[in-house]
Image (cartoon, rainbow, N blue to C red):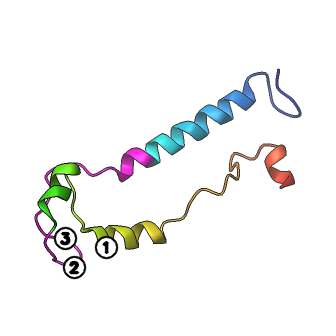
Amino acid sequence: MAGGWTRDGGVQDQIDASVEDAVTLARSRLPDGEGTARCEQCESLIPEARRKALPGVRLCVSCQTDIEKRQTTPTGYNRRGSKDSQLK
């Protein structure tokens, strides 16, 4: 049973879409393809252990950390515009 202005199953559709978006984002952040021995940003040597642990890695630890700090985290706001999300 849906509430408010949504049809039956509408809330679950929003939940499924949000989960699908999060999975797509996580998959897009995974390294793929051939890795490199040197960092693409600072040209420092990437340790062998890191290259073995993360196949396809292209950045050293410090450059990867800098990128992750600049990325925004989801705020939990439902951008699909449900009635409840607009009350926050």
Does residue 36 sit above or below 25 in this rendering? below
Tell me, yes or no, whether the two marked residues, 2 and 3, touch with CB atoms within 8 Å.
yes
Query: Is 64 drawn above or below residue 86 in the view shown?
Result: below
Residue at coordinates 82% horizontally, 26% vertically from top-left? 2
| Front label number (1 vs 2) | 1
Q: Secondary structure at mark 1?
A: helix
Q: Badge 1 local density, few (<14 within 10 Å), some, or many (20+)?
A: few
- Distance Cα–Cα, label 2 vs label 3: 6 Å
- Magenta residues, start to end: 26-45
Question: Is there a contact, CB below 8 Å, between mark 1 and mark 2?
Answer: yes
Q: Earlier in the sequence, mark 1 or mark 3?
A: 3
The verdict on residue 7 being magenta is no
- Which numbered circle lies on residue 62? 1
Specify the farthest residue to the front.
49
**On the rendered structure, is 56 left or right of 22?**
left
Type of the residue with mark 3: Cys
As rendered, which of 33 and 46 lies closer to the eye?
A: 46
Which amino acid does the dot numbered 2 rest on?
Answer: Cys
Position of residue 8 measured from the top left corner of the image (x, y, whole percent): 78, 21
Disc 2 target residue: 42
